[in-house]
């Protein structure tokens, strides 16, 4: 299942995930694991680990529930909690974990985490999927600080996803990734292009680990 990481930093939130997902034949394929819904004054970011079908179901259900109107973070939390509770009742194996971010103009970004059983406000750094392994958690605890800026947190998230991919015997760059940046007070969400992520891996990550 995908490895997903979320980091709060002094000027925003960074989400990063690989794209390796299971399919019905028990083999693996690649699919975007971070998506963004953009409205007039807000953006809602979803990053998932688990079954792609359940992630698509959640995206559809939460969109039907909140519509296209701007919704404050506390109401987004309640809406997501209701959708996930209903999905859990209808699925005996709720193989889905989520990070749900919200960006809005002149507001601090919000981040919620669903661990497969309950929704809560996310910690300063969050892990889904294989990111739960003790080695990755130790690396994050050692290298992470909430005083990091967006650039530093983005490099750290990409580096750790890269290391997770190497550990799982993907290609030299750990397989394709998605990364999203939510800046404080900004209603938009920046999605990094694949070439930008690869450039950071080739030229920028060395600065992080020196």
Image: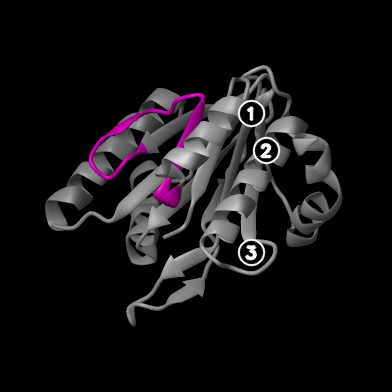
State the image coordinates of residue 142 (x, y, percent, origin top left): 59, 26
Q: Residue 173 versus residue 81: which sits nearer the camera?
A: 173
Q: Which mark is residue 143?
A: 1
When asked about the image quadrant of residue 41, the answer is top right
User: Label 2, on which residue?
Assistant: 156
The Cα–Cα distance between marks 2 and 1, rounded to whole angstroms, is 8 Å
* Badge 2 or badge 3: first in the primary sequence: 2
For the point 51% across and 62% down, which residue is it? 168
Q: Residue 127 versus residue 70: which sits nearer the camera?
A: 127
The Cα–Cα distance between marks 2 and 3, rounded to whole angstroms, is 16 Å
Q: SS at mark 2?
A: helix
Q: SS at mark 1?
A: helix
Q: Which mark is residue 172?
A: none
Q: Which mark is residue 176?
A: 3
Is residue 128 inside the magenta stretch?
Answer: yes
State the image coordinates of residue 53 (x, y, percent, origin top left): 35, 66
> Magenta residues?
114-130
Q: In the rendered view, would you say 94 is above or below 13?
A: below
């Amino acid at each position: 299942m995908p490895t997903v990481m979320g980091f709060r930093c002094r000027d925003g939130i960074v989400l990063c995930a690989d794209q390796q997902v299971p399919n019905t034949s028990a083999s693996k394929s690649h699919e975007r694991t971070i998506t963004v819904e953009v409205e007039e004054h807000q953006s809602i970011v979803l990053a998932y680990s688990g079954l792609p079908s359940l992630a698509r179901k959640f995206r559809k259900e939460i969109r039907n529930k909140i519509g296209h109107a701007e919704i404050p973070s506390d109401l987004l939390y309640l809406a997501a909690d209701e959708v996930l509770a209903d999905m859990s009742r209808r699925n005996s194996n709720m193989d889905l974990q989520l990070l749900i971010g919200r960006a809005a103009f002149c507001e601090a970004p919000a981040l919620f985490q669903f661990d497969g059983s309950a929704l809560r406000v996310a910690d300063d750094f969050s892990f889904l999927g294989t990111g739960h392994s003790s080695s990755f958690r130790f690396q994050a605890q050692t290298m992470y600080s909430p005083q990091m800026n967006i650039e530093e947190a983005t490099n750290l998230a990409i580096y750790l996803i890269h290391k997770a991919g190497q550990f799982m015997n993907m290609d030299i760059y750990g397989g394709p990734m998605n990364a999203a940046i939510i800046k404080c007070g900004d209603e938009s969400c920046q999605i990094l292009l694949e070439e930008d992520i690869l450039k950071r891996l080739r030229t920028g990550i060395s600065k992080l680990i020196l």
